[in-house]
Amino acid sequence: MKKLTMLATLFLMATPILADGHKNSNQLMNKDECSELKNGIAELLMVQDYYWQELEKDAEKKELYEAIAFYSQQAANYSTIYDVWCD
């Protein structure tokens, strides 16, 4: 019984020690990929802003509303991915 208790104690103590080497286990992408993703999000927001400016000129164009919604949603989706996997 002493051997079992000692093995269990060693196992429970060794696990946190071995796992300590990971600074951010959630980081799936490297810095370059995260930077590229961040730039892509900025581009999506710039395109969305362009469509907003076009909509201010002519509010009757319904396809502009769809484009604004599409690019806004894409930027939001990629921002979530950036937040989870890069930060």
Image: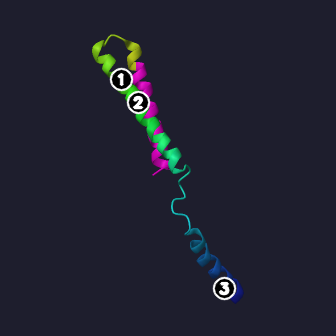
Would residue 17 be counted in the magenta stretch?
Answer: no
Q: Residue 37 or 79: which is nearer the viewer?
A: 37
Q: Which mark is residue 6?
A: 3
In the depicted structure, whether residue 85 falls above or below residue 36: below
Q: Residue at x 36, y 23 (%)?
A: 50
Which three-letter amino acid code belongs to the residue tagged 3? Met
Asked if residue 29 can be seen in this view, the reply is yes
Disc 3, SS = helix
> Residue beneath label 2, please?
72
Disc 1, SS = helix
In the rendered image, which quarter is residue 67 located in? top left
Query: Of the residues under marks 3 and 1, which one precedes in the sequence?
Result: 3
Which three-letter amino acid code belongs to the residue tagged 1? Tyr
Q: Residue at x 30, y 13 (%)?
A: 59
Task: Using the numbered discs, state the Cα–Cα distance from disc 2 to disc 1 in whole angstroms.
Answer: 12 Å
Q: Residue 69 or 9: which is nearer the viewer?
A: 69
Asked if the residue at tag 1 contacts the one at tag 2, i.e. Cβ–Cβ closer than 8 Å, the answer is no
> Residue beneath label 1, please?
50
Q: In the rendered image, which quarter contains the N terminus?
A: bottom right
